[in-house]
Amino acid sequence: MLQTRIIPPAANAHPYPLLIKSLLLSGSRYEKNREIVYRDTLRYNYATFNERVARLANVLTEAGVKAGDTVAVMDWDSHRYLECMFAVPMLGAVLHTINIRLSPEQILYTMNHAEDRFVLVNSDFAALYQGIVGQLTTVIGTMLLTDNAAAVELPGSVGEYESLLAAAEPSYAFADFDENSVATTFYTTGTTGNPKGVYFTHRQLVLHTLSMATTLGSLDSIRLMGSDDVYMPITPMFHVHAWGAPYVATMLGVKQVYPGRYEPEMLCKLIKQEQVTFSHCVPTILQMVLAAPGAQGHDFKGMKVIIGGSALNRALYEAAKACGIQLTAAYGMSETCPLISCGYLNEELLAVGEEQSTTYRIKAGVPVPLVEAAIMDSEGNRLPADGETQGELVLRAPWLTQGYFREPEKGQELWTHGWLHTGDVATLDEMGVIDIRDRLKDVIKTGGEWISSLELEDLISRQPAVKEVAVVGVVDSQWGERPFALIVAKEGQSLNAGLLKEHLKPFVERGVINKWAIPSQIALVTEIPKTSVGKLDKKRIRVDLAQWQEAGSEFLSSL
Ligand code: AMP
């Protein structure tokens, strides 16, 4: 350890822990009349928002919630969720954002594993909750969240959210405590085993918020969200706190719009009516919004959207641009809070013209302030950042989960060699641009070559008849694995393996891919399976394909 100079603070100096309550201070100071909007049913300003956070803290305290307890939420994206994102951690309790898209068995597992003490349940999930309540081991009480006046039975309920808030005191003296206290937790599902719990402290969330605000607002070539923007999440709030953007928006006093359950028509209506200018989502959700009747013919000019969670392909980038939406790719994962990198364009890249700069806008981008990224081989050796060498992306940053809750061995594995291992294969270039090539387990190994399923998906998506595509490797007795493409064709258009080969041939001739990358078999389907957060579900696709191949299914088209 270096012998640096540490000067003891004055006995009465205030140490100022980095706590989530600090993020609330500035927003309402800047713009106390700015609105927080919930669907087309409710709107209030930041002054009221602050009061409501205090009221909720009083209600939770009255219900027996104490510092150190875990408070779970099962809700769609709402103003209530935003209030919980502040009130629960500000009490010193831990907010568990339940992934309501998991199966009831998985939800039950995560709730018992996280040791949830108190649960806020939207009436839409009351039946689900009723079904698992008998097996919950730590819950002492619940609260009902509802948009309807109709009474709903919820076991152990202390009452309905709005009525309880209305009756509570509008102020609360939030105490200071250690900034390393856990503020939030949620579960990530891997390819095997039970979901794993990641967790983030107050200090981590505050630092993440500051770095994200800098990234979104201060980098001239991307400028995604400043204080005059209007923000609406289209990434569920249970998925890595809607990527942390609600904390940034609140700190800056940005107008915020919460859409409830994601219904494409409602999303379009809110974007138009509330003049939303900034959002973020996975590619499939944006595709859903753009395909909605309400989006047809609408000019989304001025709207900026971060695409993350999956690779952004050129076809989607162009389609969004044609509607007036500027897309920027970003990279992160549940374990990383999530922001790691974002598609920064420097002067040189901006000068080279649209075509080339688009190539950079759709890559995973440059690490944001305070993030260190490197690539490693399987022995833990650093590999060169030359834009070509591929290795596992490893990370260091102040806001990465420090392990998996109550699973020390898995946590140690995540942190092998003192770096967080992402499980993603990437290249890094001199500027630090991360290009995600694939998930380690999705790379297709054919005849000694590695083929990136993401790159193939990008190239295939440029075939005019292709609406959606997923590529996976399937076992092949001769080559080890061969790429297999699952495709949804655009309405009224047809496609077969031969036509796809014709489309890919020029990329082989230009050396973009090798000839083994051309799928010898494709499946034309009406829908591609998705995960709980709308990503391509490659685990399920592999199972489906194996079954179809065995049955010689009619979906298949071979060369
Ligand atoms: P999750 O933990 O469910 O949020 O998933 C994180 C994973 O999503 C990462 O490990 C990547 O495999 C993938 N991912 C996220 N952002 C990108 C991106 N910009 N490009 C490609 N893959 C991405």
Image (tube, helix red, strand yellow):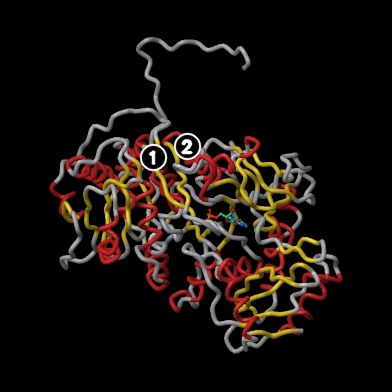
Toward which corner of the image does residue 47 lie, by quadrant? top left
Q: Confirm if mark 2 falls within 8 A of ligand 1.
A: no
Viewport quadrant of the C terminus = bottom right
| Marks 2/1: CA–CA distance | 9 Å
State the quadrant of the N terminus.
top right
The residue at which mark 2 appears reads as 204
Three-letter amino acid code at the position of disc 1: Ala
Front-lying residue, 160 or 266 = 160
Q: Nearer the viewer, residue 172 or 335?
A: 335
Q: Earlier in the sequence, mark 2 or mark 1?
A: 1
Which quadrant would residue 414 be assigned to in this image? top right
Q: Residues within 10 Å of mark 1 (few under 14, many from 20)?
A: many
Which residue position holds label 1?
A: 183
Instruction: Reply above or below: 477 against 372.
Output: below
Residue 93 is situated, as x and y percent measured from the top left of the image, at 32, 39
Q: Residue drawn at (80%, 72%), measured in percent from left and top?
A: 478
Question: Residue 98: where, in percent of width, then height?
Answer: 37, 55
Q: What is the secondary structure assignment of the residue under circle 1? A: strand
Q: Is the residue marked by circle 2 packed among few (<14), some (14-19), or many (20+) residues within 10 Å?
A: many
For the question of whether residue 9 can be seen, the reply is yes
Residue 473 versus residue 358 in the image, above or below:
below
Judging from the image, what secondary structure is the residue with disc 2 in? helix
Mark 2 and mark 1 residues within 8 Å of each other at the beta carbon: yes
Considering only vertical position in the picture, is 96 above or below 372? below
* 243 relative to 32 in the view: left or right: right
List x then y, in percent, for residue 275. Answer: 41, 62
